[in-house]
């Protein structure tokens, strides 16, 4: 869904984060897959990290969002994860505009 938002122009950039998977950054594997599906590489920002929880991911991601001067952040996540992500990202991005997409669809 994030890739679709980027491709449609709704999002200027799509940041993909995540821990390593099979000794490679999960974000790079995801981006490679999306490019193979026809999405433009320049749409994506890879943000590899070693987070193992929503809080540790927010601690890693939020400073990068500030550094990028993100004016609007739309967190695309599963319905199962959306409530926790909403609480955590609103806490760590206090004062900044954060909205959530409770995606029930499977990724591309």
Image: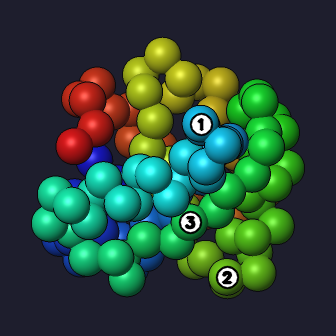
Residue visible at 33% across and 33% down in the picture: 103
Percent across and percent down for residue 10 are 28, 71
Comes first in the chain, label 1 or label 2? 1
Q: Nearer the viewer, residue 20 or 59?
A: 20
Identify the residue at image location x=46%, y=36%: 77
Q: Nearer the viewer, residue 82 or 21?
A: 21
Coordinates of residue 50 in the picture (x, y in percent): 79, 43
Choose the circle earlier in sequence order: 3 or 1: 1
Provide the secondary structure element on which disc 1 rests: loop
Residue 32 lies in quadrant? bottom left
Q: Nearer the viewer, mark 2 or mark 3?
A: 3
Residue 100 higher or lower than 65, as above or below: above
Side of 68 relative to 28 (left or right)? right
Q: Is residue 30 above or below residue 67?
A: above
Q: Which residue is mark 3?
A: 46
- The answer to whether 23 appears left or right of 52 in the picture is left
Q: Would you say residue 1 is visible in this rendering?
A: yes
């Amino acid at each position: 869904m994030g890739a679709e938002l980027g491709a449609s122009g709704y999002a200027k950039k799509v940041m993909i984060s995540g821990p390593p998977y099979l000794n490679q950054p999960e974000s790079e594997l995801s981006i490679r897959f999306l490019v193979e599906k026809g999405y433009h590489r320049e749409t994506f920002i890879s943000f590899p990290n070693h987070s193992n929880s929503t809080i540790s991911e927010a601690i890693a991601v939020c400073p990068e969002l500030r550094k990028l001067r993100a004016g609007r952040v739309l967190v695309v996540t599963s319905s199962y994860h959306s409530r926790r992500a909403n609480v955590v990202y609103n806490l760590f991005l206090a004062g900044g505009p954060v909205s959530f997409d409770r995606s029930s669809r499977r990724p591309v």
